[in-house]
């Protein structure tokens, strides 16, 4: 057994050396018959022109669902179908990834049509219209009316990054999507999908021929330069800046947070990751917020915190890859609570954040969380495909070696003092953006600015300890003021 | 050793589709204890990780007593409330300390508890898992608190109009069988859950028994070691399974339809469901519906191209065959962009069905579909968890995973005539049920 591990470590070290220089290629060869190809183009939603928000998203959709010059999308679907080929182009704030996954038996049939999508995209009007229509429906119906949790997060991010290129939910806004033309798409494609602006990743049983062919074919993309990512400067937050999105809602979704100035790769990030995991590990009952709000009080389905963007958290258990961004926020996500407990639930979460910042982590919690994360990280990338995706993220963050390997190593190195220093440096509880998605918004506004007591009643008996703590939470004072609590009707969002 | 675990890969044991005439690409062993507990052991050397699935062959289907809908799902929550030996706090802290990823889910036919962890922790996991399956303990207070969380989950789900559609469909399409309610249960029953403490104890005693549970262990472990641990930790589990008294659903004799007004905004949603059979690899008609779902309504179907790509009348359209343990339904679902097109879209769906009855499907399309099916299945099995997670529905329907090879072998033999016969057999107006949901203006 030991020999196998050593042999594999050796192979992996080879991969590391390949990936850690400044080359634009990451290769993770193995004998896995399923080959993954990932091409990261250095562009994303942040590059949308101000009046064309959604352009990056629409272009990436059109690249994967718009066929090639010679084959319509319909024909491509037929062609890829028997090959069981996975092919998609996904965009996020700063990364656009062309993803392909194919069994080696089918590689030769797959490749020419796959690469033609990048070199000779179809860009047909009817496909553009379909994709625009889908994006509009997403904003107008799905996000506004049937996904309150994602809506809360979308509004939070837009509020935090207001008036910066980050103020973009991907699908942009209704008016900007409507204004996107094929000419816009073509210009965007030529500018950003150029031969100097990508990193190529390959894993699985890929032979030299595939690697050289891919490199040579990508050399046929338009000439251009590496995208110059401009600095993002979110405006300072003044106290509790709150948006109440008013809509008919049986339950209240709550998200709040503030920008942080630390990203993975730095020692401080791993220290903060320990604190964050303890406070609110995503979809995990070890989350302290989960324990306080869900486990002890049964108020909702879960409560979590983040130091990295985690889109579609309701659907995924483990952190996503390839949504890297230079500017992250600290964020708390309270899943829908009964409307009558919205004020209480928010207070409970805020109080826990304050307790963590004021008291720091205890030795015991620190030890347990370190131990937890050390193995939990094993589950982040169980397949080669996901490992390749993480390797591209390493390139994004400029991490020499592997973030996930470093994450595990850091769990043996980071001290409690470092964790508590990172908490004091990066977290705070005095200035933040807060979003409620709820009905009866005026009442909530009044309750918040008047610091009205928010006692809670249960339908089942609770221990005296919980009841005593509830009294403290119910009167926990928060610095809201009338001027900073805005009410927005859901129809007014993303127009 | 731990240092390298993460980077190990499972590729060495992957094989091409079709080797040895079997599609399931891993060697496995069925190991059954004297008390009836079956474990399916799937060693995958080199991964460093184990996926551990406890499949309880009880889901909302088994909630046959009036007023008790939603209990299988609720009970899934209670299973995290601890035992005398491992109280909830201790269970959580053990799971946390080994960095396991643990969770559970419930569907109409099953409840699954799953955990992923480093290989070195297999014994720890067997110890805590076997204990809660045999000696679960919880107080009335814990029970009632969890009922609140379940109601919260119901509220969360109701914000998605599709959950409303499926809830309405179940209630309308079934008269007697327990598929009448969804896994969440009727809202009135969920509200009443805090009063059902005694019933919960009986639920556990009847269903959480060795002959009703199948374990799947996939990943980096030795079978001999696993078998010895299974004997140690599960050997003492007492039999005592009591089967539910589920009424058979009478034959549906007329078309049913309901229009639902959704409180929130939504594009119109349409769900058209035809009564089907229970899952079996020996039922040629049923197996043919797996192909029909893709041929008639999938992304390469004529209907998809027409409605989604060319006319752009719908946001998406798709279908899923019955894979239930008892006779389920073949569902056709779509999201329509404009309310005025509802009748048109429905007409196009019905036209497609008629066409499949009258015209044999193109042989090339059918053979392409078979090829795709095999490669898709193989490509979905690239790590211990993806292997283990692909198995529970087969296990609950048939008790094991032998059915996978049988099913793919039979699917290979389906002809265009079989497809035609199956469409004629199932897709009859009087066996169909239609829900149309319209959002508020």
Image (cartoon, helix red, strand yellow):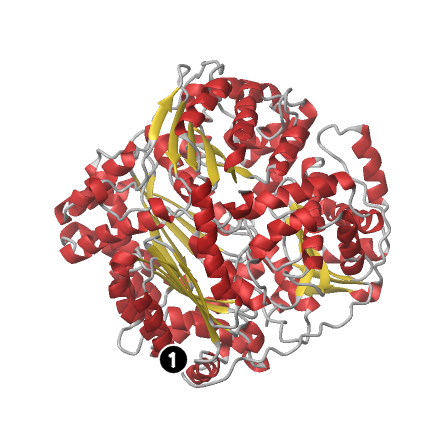
Q: Is residue A291 left or right of residue B221?
A: right
Residue B94 left/right relative to A209: right
Query: Image height check: is B15 above or below A23?
Result: above
Q: Position of residue A244 (x, y in %)?
A: 71, 60
The mark total stands at: 1
Residue position for label 1:
A219
Q: Is residue A12 visible?
A: yes
Is any atom of residue A336 visible in this view?
no
Frontmost residue, A351 versus B388: B388
Point out residue A473 in the picture as x, y percentages from the top left corner.
Answer: 82, 43
- The residue depicted at 67 percent of the width and 23 percent of the height is B140
The answer to whether residue B414 is left or right of residue A256 is left
Residue in the picture at 84% in, 47% down? A359
Judged from the image, the secondary structure of the residue bearing numbered disc 1 is loop
Residue nearer the viewer, A153 or A321: A321
| Residue B113 coordinates in the image, percent (x, y) | 50, 33
Toward the viewer: A94 or A477?
A: A94
For residue B346, which quarter of the picture? bottom left
Residue at point 47% right, 74% down?
A198
Q: Is residue B263 above or below residue B421?
A: below
Q: Which residue is painted at 81% across and 41% down in the image?
A: A455
Disc 1 crowd rating (10 Å Cα; few below 14, some 14-19, many 20+) is some
Which chain is mark 1 on?
A
The answer to which quarter of the image holds residue B411 is top left
Residue A118 in the image, given as x and y percentages of width and height? 37, 75
């Amino acid at each position: 057994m030991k020999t196998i591990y050593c042999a594999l470590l050796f192979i992996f070290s080879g991969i590391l050396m390949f990936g850690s220089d400044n080359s634009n290629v990451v290769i993770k060869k193995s004998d896995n018959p399923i080959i993954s190809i990932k091409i990261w183009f250095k562009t994303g939603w942040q590059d949308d022109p101000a009046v064309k928000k959604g352009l990056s998203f629409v272009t990436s959709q059109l690249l994967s669902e718009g066929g090639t010059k010679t084959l319509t999308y319909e024909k491509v679907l037929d062609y890829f179908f028997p090959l069981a080929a996975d092919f998609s182009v996904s965009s996020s704030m700063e990364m656009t990834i062309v993803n392909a996954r194919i069994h080696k038996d089918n590689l030769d049939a797959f490749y020419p049509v796959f690469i033609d999508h990048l070199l000779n995209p179809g860009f047909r009007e009817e496909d553009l219209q379909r994709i625009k229509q889908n994006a509009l429906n997403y904003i107008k119906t799905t996000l506004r009316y049937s996904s309150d949790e994602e809506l809360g997060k979308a509004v939070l991010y837009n509020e935090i990054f207001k008036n910066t290129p980050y103020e973009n939910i991907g699908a942009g806004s209704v008016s900007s999507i409507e204004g996107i033309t094929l000419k816009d798409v073509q210009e965007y494609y030529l500018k950003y999908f150029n031969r100097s602006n990508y990193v190529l990743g390959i894993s699985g049983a890929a032979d030299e021929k595939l690697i050289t062919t891919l490199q040579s074919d990508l050399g046929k993309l338009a000439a251009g330069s590496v995208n110059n990512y401009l600095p993002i400067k979110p405006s300072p937050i003044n106290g509790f800046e709150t948006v109440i999105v008013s809509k008919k809602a049986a339950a209240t979704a709550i998200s709040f947070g503030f920008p942080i100035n630390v990203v993975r790769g730095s020692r401080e990030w791993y220290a903060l990751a320990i604190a964050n995991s303890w406070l609110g590990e995503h979809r995990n009952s070890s989350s302290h917020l989960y324990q306080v709000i869900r486990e002890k009080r049964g108020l909702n389905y879960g409560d979590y915190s983040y130091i990295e963007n985690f889109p579609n958290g309701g659907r995924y258990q483990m952190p996503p890859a390839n949504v890297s961004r230079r500017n992250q926020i600290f964020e708390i996500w309270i899943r829908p609570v009964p409307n009558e407990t919205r004020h209480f639930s928010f207070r409970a979460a805020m109080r826990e954040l304050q307790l963590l910042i004021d008291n720091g982590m205890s030795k015991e919690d620190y030890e347990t969380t370190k131990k937890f994360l050390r193995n939990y990280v094993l589950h982040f990338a169980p397949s080669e495909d996901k490992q390749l995706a993480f390797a591209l993220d390493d390139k994004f963050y400029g991490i020499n070696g592997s973030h996930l390997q470093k994450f595990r190593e850091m769990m043996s190195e980071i001290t409690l003092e470092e964790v508590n220093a990172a908490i004091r440096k990066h977290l705070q509880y005095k200035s933040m953006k807060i979003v409620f998605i709820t009905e009866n918004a005026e009442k909530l506004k009044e309750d918040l600015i008047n610091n009205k007591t928010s006692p809670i009643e249960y339908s089942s008996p609770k221990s005296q300890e919980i009841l005593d703590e509830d009294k403290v939470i119910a009167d926990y004072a928060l610095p809201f003021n009338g001027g900073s609590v805005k009410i927005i009707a859901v129809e007014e969002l993303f127009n | 050793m731990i240092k390298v675990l993460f980077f190990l890969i499972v590729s060495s044991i992957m094989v091409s589709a079709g080797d040895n005439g079997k599609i399931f690409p891993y060697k496995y062993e069925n190991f059954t204890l004297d008390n009836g507990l079956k474990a399916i052991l799937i060693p995958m050397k080199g991964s460093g990780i184990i996926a551990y699935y406890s499949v309880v062959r009880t889901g909302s289907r088994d909630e046959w007593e009036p007023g008790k809908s939603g209990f299988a799902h609720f009970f899934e929550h209670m299973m995290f409330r601890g035992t005398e030996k491992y109280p909830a706090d201790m269970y959580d802290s053990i799971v946390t300390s080994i960095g396991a990823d643990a969770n559970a889910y419930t569907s109409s036919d099953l409840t699954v508890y799953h955990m992923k962890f480093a290989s070195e922790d297999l014994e720890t996991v067997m110890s805590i898992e076997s204990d809660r399956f045999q000696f679960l303990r919880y107080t009335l207070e814990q029970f009632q608190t969890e009922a609140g969380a379940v109601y919260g989950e119901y509220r969360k789900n109701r914000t998605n109009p599709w959950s409303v559609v499926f809830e309405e469909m179940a209630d309308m399409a079934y008269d007697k069988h327990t598929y009448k309610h969804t896994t969440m249960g009727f809202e009135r029953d969920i509200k009443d859950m805090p009063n059902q403490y005694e019933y919960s104890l009986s639920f556990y005693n009847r269903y959480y028994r060795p002959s009703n549970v199948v374990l799947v262990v996939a990943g980096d472990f030795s079978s001999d070691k696993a078998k010895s641990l299974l004997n140690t930790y599960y050997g003492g589990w007492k039999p005592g399974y009591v089967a539910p008294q589920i009424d058979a659903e009478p034959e549906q004799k007329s078309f049913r339809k309901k229009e639902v007004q959704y409180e929130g905004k939504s594009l119109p949603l349409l769900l058209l469901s035809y009564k089907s059979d229970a899952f079996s690899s020996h039922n040629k008609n049923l197996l043919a519906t797996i192909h029909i779902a893709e041929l008639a309504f999938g992304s390469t179907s004529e209907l998809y191209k027409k409605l989604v790509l060319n006319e752009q009348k719908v946001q998406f359209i798709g279908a899923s065959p019955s894979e239930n343990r008892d006779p389920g339904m073949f569902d056709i679902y779509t999201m329509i962009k404009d309310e005025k097109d509802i009748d048109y879209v429905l007409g196009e769906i019905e036209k497609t069905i008629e066409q499949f009855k009258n015209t044999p499907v193109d042989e090339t399309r059918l053979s392409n579909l078979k090829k795709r099916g095999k490669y898709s299945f193989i490509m979905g099995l690239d790590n211990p968890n993806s292997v283990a997670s692909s198995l529970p529905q087969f296990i609950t329907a048939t008790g094991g995973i032998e059915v996978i090879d049988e099913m793919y072998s039979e699917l290979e033999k389906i002809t265009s005539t079989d497809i035609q016969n199956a469409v004629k057999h199932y897709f009859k107006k009087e066996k169909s049920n239609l829900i149309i949901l319209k959002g508020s203006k």
